[in-house]
Amino acid sequence: MRTGFIWEGKTRNWLFLPVALLMAVMPVVVRATQHFLSGDLYRLFLTNQKTEIFSQYRARFLWMMAAIMLILLLVFCKKLFSGIDRLGWLYFVACGVFLLCLLLSTLLSNHRDTALWGMYDRAEGMMTQISYLILFLYTALSYRSAQDLKLIMVAMGVLIAVNSIMGISQFAGHDLMASDWVNSLVVPDDMEGKISAIQFKKAKMYGTVNHYNYLGSIAAMAFPVCSVLALFEKRWKFRLPLLLAALLSLMLLLGSTSRAGLVGTAAAVVLAAIFFRRLLFRHWKLVLSVFGGLLVAVIGLNFALQNAIFERVPMLFDDIVTVFSDTSDFDYKDELPIRAVENTDTGAVITVQRDALFLSSEEGQIVFRDQQGNEVPFTFNEKGVLVTQNNAFADLSFRPVNSVDGNTPYTYLRLIYNRKQLLQFYYDDTQIYLARTNTTKPMTLEEPPIAGFLKGKERIGSMRGYIWSRTIPILPRYLALGAGPDCFIYEFPQDDVLGKLYAYGVGNIVVDKPHNLYLQIFVNEGGIALLAFLAICISYLWDCFRLYGGKRRDPNGFRGIAVGLGVAGYLFAGFFNDSTVTTSIMFWILLGVGVGMNRQYRKESV
């Protein structure tokens, strides 16, 4: 009797159905939600209203499914907890440590509401993080056989199909997510007319996730799993759907143009080559033929689409060169028209490369002087902007603006550089000083410490170098406990206006995420929580190498390798991407499947 590769036997494991349902339904849980900002969030975004469609309802669906799983864990605890081995208890202890750090970080957070429920467009607060842990443990405990893997692959196929349909429309410039039909489904009636607050990327695939980079993380998980299962499945009725899923995953990877996804996938391919090295050497002609055919097809498609697929790949190689270059003597302020802005007893001073512009309010008039005390003439142009012909300050211009702080009307000068607002100066009849945007409160520009090895590398990885260079020096604050789940936005030095000006070309951008999974956990939940997370992931991957790294191969071994490569793809992409609800649900399910699969493999090998 022939044994199937994708599933064995006909026994159904009903306890595993919630896991597969969560993965399959996840990509279509899209609903617009409106958020009203106050306090620090209002100060950062300068608006009291934000709209998003990808996170909140997805998180709520996760909470509901996690609650169901928790109930099932309690009701069927005897069945689910039977046969847990020593490594299984290690996972439990690591999850317990992470949970404790999570609870304490939330309880002690200065922004407890955000820590509990999450940021408006991320929804990864304590409720979501606890749901991840429940999802992981339930998946690991409820996995029983390859029949469960079949359910997960069907669910993954649905996820890939939905994102492929949406992704193709986005790549073609006819985004279904922005269509009237989809809007009528995802936008509540009471938000009619407010859909314009939601912005969509054109000509890049982002599917039904927050950003094309996150679609790259999904592809980095799906492609290795589907490819390995397809290559070693003997029956064509299963191999063909797996091959199609693998090709669609590759399409999502290339169409997203996510360099993080490419790195994650490349790492998974390297690990696959290590696992299957003997097999590759044995069939090297076939391997080269398949690889060459795929390469020619992708290059040809890229040429036909006018370099749309590989447009960002050269940036990856430029970043690699920059990383290994010596920039220790680099000073980013040498590249800016402004070196410093500060308040003084008599007004404000803007230091430029070869001079300094002193601002003072004298009898209700703004007077500009250079560092020798000579008055610098600024006159209004036809657009109502103050400009000067003085070469030292020609890059600077000012626009007077009337505003209201609370119920108090006031006037401020908006400093403009490169046609974009950089800073504002409050003034009245007797004083002028640098103030926070849309307020009368004085402001001091931050000059945060910079990680030495990233000095001069702020622009690598689409400005990830800037974010990391300012995030790494603050990590010692969070060695024990973090600032609270989803609270990174409050901890980043947002008043580093000149650093942002150098990196982004604008000074008032809000950095709301670290673009690194590990820095995200460190700042939000703390260094101990990060160690607990790494203990789970490294223990699992080491277990995979120990179980499947030998010469012996069987269907269970191939399945275990496939899932392990998917987990590794996400973890390597995580060096350049942080987590979001969609990608994290998929990751924790795959990790749980892998842990459960390894446990079953050990049992059957005894």
Image (cartoon, rainbow, N blue to C red):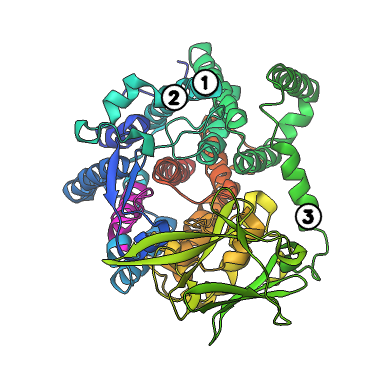
User: Mark 2 or mark 1: which is in front?
Assistant: 1
- The quadrant of the image that shows the N terminus is top left
Which sits earlier in the primary sequence, circle 3 or circle 2? Answer: 2
User: How far is the residue under mark 3 from the one under mark 2?
Assistant: 39 Å
| Residue 448 appears in view | no
Of 583 and 512, the residue lying toward us: 512
Q: Do the CB atoms of the residues marked 3 and 2 lie less than 8 Å apart?
A: no
User: How far is the residue under mark 3 from the one under mark 1?
Assistant: 34 Å
Q: Residues within 10 Å of mark 1 (few under 14, many from 20)?
A: many
Q: Is residue 211 above or below residue 475?
A: above
Magenta stretch encompasses residue 130 = yes
Q: Residue at x 70, y 31 (%)?
A: 310
Q: Is residue 571 above or below residue 170?
A: below
Q: Is residue 341 left or right of residue 328?
A: left
Q: Is residue 306 left or right of residue 482?
A: right
Residue position for label 1: 168
The kind of residue tagged 2 is Gly
Q: Residues within 10 Å of mark 3 (few under 14, many from 20)?
A: some
User: Mark 3 or mark 2: which is in front?
Assistant: 3
Q: Do the CB atoms of the residues marked 3 and 1 lie less than 8 Å apart?
A: no
The kind of residue tagged 1 is Ile
Residue position for label 2: 157
Residue 122: image x %, image y %? 38, 49
Residue 442: image x %, image y %? 45, 76
Residue 572: image x %, image y %? 60, 48
Residue position for label 3: 322
Magenta-tinted stretch: 115-137
Q: Residue at x 29, y 61 (%)?
A: 38
Q: Is residue 317 above or below residue 465?
A: above
Magenta stretch mostly in which secondary structure?
helix
The kind of residue tagged 3 is Thr
